[in-house]
Image: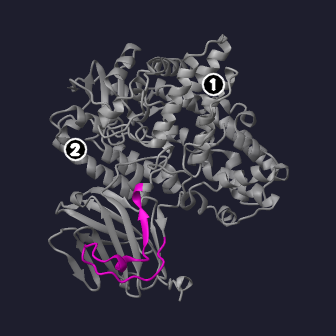
């Protein structure tokens, strides 16, 4: 493994999630564990042999060459700053350094690992607790001791899931072996069926045999790991079509889950109440997740206290229970990436939410195994192809970079099919491994311009390396195409431009004068989607700046979606926790005490600096709200920083 994300999430999330649930009697949930996760967790029985990052981390810094040292520091600095680095004082100090001597780097490495240790380890593991008390001045012996205890801990994760499943506390599911978008393997035309405007590769080919093998390998590994066959699947990225359902059914699966967008594309009657029950298609039970509620947890609640977030969640859920008899609500979300954006790894949120569940008589939690046995189910005559993102497959096809990756897979498959030499069973097995790995959805996720990561070039190289290895196994020279990077080098900070000069625009909701917003800062919300995705709200771009009296904000996007009279714009000032609330009624522009709001071609706001008179700099967050529903939280990365004392003198010129 080149990167340590599995290990880091293992010590932070993979044990902690079911552990938190198990602390509350009667609570139940379903967890999905993929085959690559199982295989990688098992590799930590020999971490230094199997994890490149840990092999560097374990070495004394004096033994690292310059390239390895730079890469190690880069990876350690990729940790979420506000919630994981800043709370550890010495880690925060070191984070801002450009260069480290050997003693400082040892401290930085250990504090990085401690920052990733979850609440379970911080509360229960003696060595982790002792190292937190030490704070700094760590040694190589400390590193060795920490690594040993963490690897021993990782070995307990899968047995813990197996025990909770046996006790009926949880259901477990899995995903096709290498996390492929199965409908695209079966038929690339599914991309056009889900979105007729999508451009697919020329001359695609069906990889149906690979699709079946992805499913069968996953079932086999699951049974080997947990001692029983799986009863359900979370298709990778919730990607479904009718043919994949048949493949699952033929292999003894009873249920799958996907997104509400698929349900509404499959039904003629698309009223919201249709969502709150399981459905059967071709005998397969399907749970369709409530996208909005799932995203509240995944994206919005990190900005609220655990108590406020859990209270809000129950307030949103209660009307569903009241208005829909015997309702079943599916809340399904990423089980790992969200929590590093919450304070305390979401411990306060989970404990508050689970306590509310335990005390609420009108709501009970169920596993998906229990759901599959319910009598109150709907029947689907057809199932639309699509995924949990927008109900289509555009995240994995359509863009020139994504399509180029598919072309290389098809080209390699055709070259192997036309190979006239003898292939031994051992070589054939290795070739198959690389083909299945190249079909993983993650490669396509990072191609195109819809998601951004500072490790994009590394992902690109890893993808092409799988295909190159196939040619090498056949003693053939890989085609020159495979040596050419697919991905364009894109900066991860391109979504944010800081203001260059003071501005004084007219607040009229119109794009009337090029010069009035010239020099403002901007946030491109469309470029803020990384390891997770969400319903992309109506606002796509934010402009901001200020003069000596006023902070100015402008929002552009789908203005038609903002025409509901009940919408409000809420501004949260983090320094004071003050909430400013403005009606977004287009017919009644707001103007009061130096603050103005107008909606037309775009939404524009002039906010009096009187709200910030005791501060030289502020952090603000913005929410578009309808009743209890949070339509969009902005900026997507956290809070908008505004330096109120900035004069822009460095930008002046004559």
Spatial CA span between label 2 and label 1: 52 Å
**Rendering coords of residue 145 (x, y %):** 76, 44
- Residue situated in front as seen by the camera: 501 or 9: 501
Residue displayed at 29% across by 62% down? 624
Does residue 283 appear left or right of residue 450 in this picture? left
Query: Is the image coloured rainbow, by chain, by secondary structure, or in one colour?
Result: one colour
Give the label on residue 544, or none. none
**Rendering coords of residue 562 (x, y %):** 23, 61
Locate residue 147: give its quadrant.
top right
Locate residue 241: give its quadrant.
top left
Q: In which quarter of the image is the N terminus?
A: top right
Highlighted range, magenta: 498-526
Residue 301: tell me if it is visible: no
Does residue 537 appear left or right of residue 327 in this picture? right
- Residue situated in front as seen by the camera: 180 or 217: 180
Which residue corresponds to mark 1? 470
Residue displayed at 57% across by 45% down? 12
Whether tag 2 and tag 1 are in contact, CB under 8 A, the answer is no
Residue displayed at 70% across by 57% down? 133
- Residue situated in front as seen by the camera: 414 or 607: 414
Residue displayed at 31% across by 40% down? 197
Name the front one of labels 2 and 1: 1
**Rendering coords of residue 628 (x, y %):** 26, 57
Closer to the N terminus: mark 2 or mark 1?
A: 2
**Rendering coords of residue 638 (x, y %):** 45, 62
Which residue corresponds to mark 2? 320
Locate residue 11: give its quadrant.
top right
Q: Magenta stretch: residue 524 in it?
A: yes
């Amino acid at each position: 493994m080149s990167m340590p994300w599995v290990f880091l999430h293992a010590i932070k999330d993979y044990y902690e999630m079911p552990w938190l649930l198990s602390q509350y009697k009667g609570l139940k949930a379903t967890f999905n564990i993929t085959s690559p996760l199982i295989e990688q967790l098992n590799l930590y029985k020999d971490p230094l042999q199997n994890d490149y990052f840990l092999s560097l981390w374990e070495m004394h810094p004096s033994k690292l060459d310059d390239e390895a040292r730079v890469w190690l520091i880069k990876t350690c600095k990729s940790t979420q700053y506000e919630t994981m680095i800043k709370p550890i004082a010495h880690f925060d100090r070191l984070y801002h350094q450009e260069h480290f001597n050997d003693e400082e780097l040892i401290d930085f490495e250990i504090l990085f690992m401690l920052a990733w240790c979850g609440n379970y380890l911080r509360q229960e593991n003696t060595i982790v607790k002792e190292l937190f008390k030490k704070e700094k001045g760590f040694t190589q012996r400390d590193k060795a001791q920490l690594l040993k205890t963490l690897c021993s801990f990782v070995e307990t994760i899968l047995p813990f899931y197996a025990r909770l499943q046996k006790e009926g506390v949880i259901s477990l599911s899995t995903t096709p072996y290498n996390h492929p978008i199965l409908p695209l393997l079966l038929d690339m035309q599914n991309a056009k069926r889900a979105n007729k405007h999508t451009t697919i590769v020329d001359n695609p080919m069906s990889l149906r045999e690979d699709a079946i093998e992805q499913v069968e390998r996953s079932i086999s590994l699951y049974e080997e790991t947990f001692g029983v066959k799986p009863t359900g699947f979370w298709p990778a990225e919730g990607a479904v079509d009718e043919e994949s359902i048949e493949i699952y059914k033929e292999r003894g699966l009873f249920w799958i889950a996907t997104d509400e967008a698929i349900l509404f594309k499959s039904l003629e009657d698309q009223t919201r109440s249709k969502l709150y029950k399981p459905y059967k298609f071709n005998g397969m039970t399907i749970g369709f997740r409530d996208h909005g509620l799932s995203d509240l947890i995944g994206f919005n609640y990190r900005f609220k206290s655990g108590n406020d977030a859990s209270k809000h969640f129950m307030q949103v859920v209660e009307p569903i229970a009241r208005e829909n008899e015997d309702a079943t609500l599916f809340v399904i979300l990423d089980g790992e990436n969200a929590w590093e954006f919450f304070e305390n790894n979401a411990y306060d949120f989970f404990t508050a939410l689970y306590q509310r569940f335990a005390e609420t008589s009108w709501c009970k939690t169920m596993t998906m195994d229990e759901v599959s046995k319910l009598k109150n189910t709907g029947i689907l005559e057809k199932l639309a192809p699509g995924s949990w993102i927008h109900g289509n497959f555009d995240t994995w096809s359509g863009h020139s970079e994504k399509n180029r990756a598919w072309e290389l897979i098809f080209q390699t498959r055709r070259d192997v099919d036309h190979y006239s030499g003898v292939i031994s069973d051992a070589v054939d097995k290795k070739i198959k491994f690389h083909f299945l790995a190249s079909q993983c959805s993650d490669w396509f996720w990072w191609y195109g311009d819809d998601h951004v990561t500072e490790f994009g070039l590394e992902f690109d190289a890893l993808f092409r390396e799988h295909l190159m290895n196939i040619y090498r196994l056949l003693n053939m020279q890989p085609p020159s195409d495979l040596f050419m990077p697919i991905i364009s080098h894109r900066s991860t900070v391109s979504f944010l431009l800081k203001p260059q000069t003071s501005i004084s625009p007219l607040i009229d909701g119109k794009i009337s004068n090029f010069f009035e917003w010239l020099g403002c800062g901007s946030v491109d919300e469309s470029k803020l989607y990384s390891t997770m995705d969400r319903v992309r709200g109506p606002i796509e771009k934010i402009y901001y700046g200020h003069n000596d009296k006023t902070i100015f904000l402008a929002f552009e996007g789908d203005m038609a979606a903002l025409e509901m009279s009940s919408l409000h714009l809420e501004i949260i000032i983090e320094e004071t926790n003050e909430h400013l609330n403005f009606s977004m009624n287009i017919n009644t522009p707001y103007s009061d005490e130096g603050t103005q709001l107008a909606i037309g071609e775009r939404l524009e706001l002039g906010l009096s600096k009187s709200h910030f008179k005791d501060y030289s700099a502020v952090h603000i967050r913005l929410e578009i709200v309808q009743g209890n529903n949070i339509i969009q939280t902005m900026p997507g990365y956290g809070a908008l920083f505004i330096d109120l004392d900035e004069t822009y003198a460095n930008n002046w010129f004559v």
